Amino acid sequence: MKELLLVGAGSCLGGMARYIVSLAFKNLSDYPLATFTANIIGCFIIGVLWTVTNKYSNMSNSISLFLMVGFCGGFTTFSSFSKESIMMMLSGHYLPFLLYSFGSVILGLIAVVFGAALAK
């Protein structure tokens, strides 16, 4: 039960942080910058946390659950990313669809690696 509450609390904070990001990018562009930004930042954060967790074996599993599963899970938005990608494709915006879809995945992977390298 403790683990479930830790994940829930982290997810709540991650969701609130994600909403703040969406407010910051509100009405700036038709391109889903808020989702893109949240996902890349979330990938970077999880890369840092993953490395720090592995580096310090005495780090509590509770902290890992709260931050990586909870906060990062609540902050990043794969379902929004998927919906926005399909909406772009269906509306005939093929280049933005490709840039957003592949850019999110590629930059997300790079952000995890960069975050992990930075934390070493």
Image (cartoon, rainbow, N blue to C red):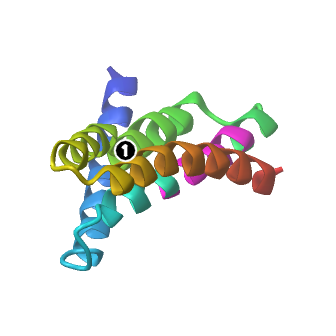
Q: Main secondary structure of the magenta part?
A: helix
46 is within the stretch colored magenta: yes
Question: Which residue is located at x 29 percent, y 36 percent?
Answer: 8
Count of marks placed on residues: 1
**In this view of the protein, which residue sits in the foreground, 47 or 58?**
47
Give the percent coordinates (x, y) of residue 42: 48, 51
Q: Which quarter of the picture shows residue 90?
A: top left
Q: What is the span of residues highlighted in magenta in the rendered image?
A: 41-51
Q: Which residue is mark 1?
A: 10
Q: Is residue 40 left or right of residue 10?
A: right
Residue 84 visible in the displayed image: yes
Residue 17 visible in the displayed image: no
Q: Is residue 48 left or right of residue 1?
A: right
* Dot 1 crowding, Cα within 10 Å, few <14, some 14–19, many 20+: many
Q: Residue furthest right?
A: 120
Q: Amino acid at mark 1?
A: Gly
Question: Which residue is located at x 61 percent, y 42 percent?
Answer: 109
Give the percent coordinates (x, y) of residue 65: 48, 32
58 is within the stretch colored magenta: no
Give the percent coordinates (x, y) of residue 113: 71, 45
Give the percent coordinates (x, y) of residue 102: 49, 44
> From what the image shows, is residue 40 above or below residue 11?
below
Question: Which residue is located at x 25 percent, y 44 percent?
Answer: 89
> From what the image shows, is residue 23 above or below residue 80?
below
